[in-house]
Image: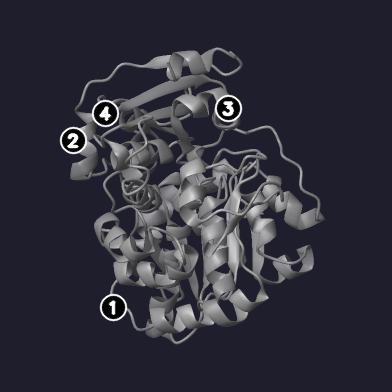
Amino acid sequence: MKYLSTRGGGEAVNFSAAISLGLAPDGGIFQPQMDESFWRESAAAVVRECEKCSDFPSLAAQMLKPFLRDDPLQEKLEDICTRALTFPIPLIDIGEHTSLLELFHGPTCAFKDVGASFLAECLSHLNRDDPRPRVVLVATSGDTGGAVARAFFGRPATRVVILFPKGMVSARQQAQLCAWGDNINAYAVRGTFDDCQRMVKGALADATLHARMRLLSANSINIGRLLPQAAYYAYASLEYRHRHGVAPGVIVPSGNLGNGVAAVLALRMGFPIREVVLATNANRAVPDYFASGRYQGQPTVQTLANAMDVGAPSNFERLMALFADFSGLKTRVRSLSVSDAEIREVIRTGERRFGQIFCPHTAVGIRAREVLGGKNWIVAATAHPAKFETLVEPLIGHDIPVPETLAGLLNKPYSLSELDAWDPAWMHVALP
């Protein structure tokens, strides 16, 4: 399979080249070329084979096969999935017609562990004879940076540079970003997540930097981060149908839209997903698009669900590429916005009503499920609530047990380095 820029420029490349570049040369992001024969024939065959799989790593390898067809990594795919996807992804029922897809059992307690681990394993096999150092750039609004840091920590000839908005991540998220040392460098940017994202894209477009280093992004703009996330929606939809006999709707708390697009991709491939709902916080660019048919990026609004504070989601371009037109998109995908007051109420009452403690992002999904009503929903639980203790614990009235992997990192000392969002010299500081 070949990959083209969402903006139509440049030549088609294979999967290995797409993940090694991260961003397309014309400033777009790589999208697999999926024509009607793919949706009609290849995808249907993949679904049939996935139905036979007994565990998540084998299903992920099966689902991803067509995306790595004729690629140097194709023969290593099963081993990559086995090595990367070592943690459980349980689907638990929290009501008669609602299930929670717990995506926070990985090493950094967030759904980003799936894509980051997969991407790191893929890249470990590529360009081993290239003398230039590999530099992985990450813009993060909370959880991506920690997952990428862990996935690439200690890997030879690899350096990770993380940019996050100063004061807009939780204390524990900040510790996960800054406490690694070794080949991991994190910077608090005096600006917003959208500023961080712009800085990363600017560096990726700099030809002089590419001459000195193998520069790539590990955000969800990298297709190697996004594709494996589609596998857990495929897995969950098959499991839900096995238990309940029907195809569920899937609700995805959404910021930069990588996780949401992954769910839509699984839907388009024919996995038993009735519809996908993209649930946002007060950042309304996507809900406003669905309401009007006109997309406009907006200034970022700071909310309680900080990892979703994105005013101009990069993966919107990929969402558009999955359907022929707006009317087709609206038949299978919806979007709605949830306020901070609603987030607080879901967290405050979650134990009593569902027997669950929710992180603020998962609370967005739970509130969306309540607004939508009806039956047979899966809500993606994107992060462990212990990462947001300063918000969650006062609302629930008691401490949250901290997972062992998170506790170990929180006990490490760290120092904080800062950058100005609009300083053109930032690359000379972070990428000497």
Q: CA distance from mark 4 to mark 2?
A: 11 Å
Q: CA distance from mark 3 to mark 1?
A: 46 Å
Nearest to N terminus: mark 4 or mark 1: 1
Q: Secondary structure at mark 3?
A: helix
Q: CA distance from mark 4 to mark 1?
A: 35 Å
Q: Which residue is mark 1?
A: 54
Closer to the camera: disc 3 or disc 4?
A: 3
Q: Position of residue 349 (x, y in %)?
A: 42, 53
Task: Say what amino acid the circle numbered 3 marks.
Answer: Ala
Closer to the camera: disc 3 or disc 2?
A: 3
Q: CA distance from mark 3 to mark 2?
A: 39 Å
Observer-nearest of 350 and 81: 81
Q: Which residue is mark 3?
A: 207
Disc on res. 180: 4
Q: Position of residue 236 (x, y in %)?
A: 41, 71
Whether residue 34 is visible to the viewer of this picture, yes or no, is yes
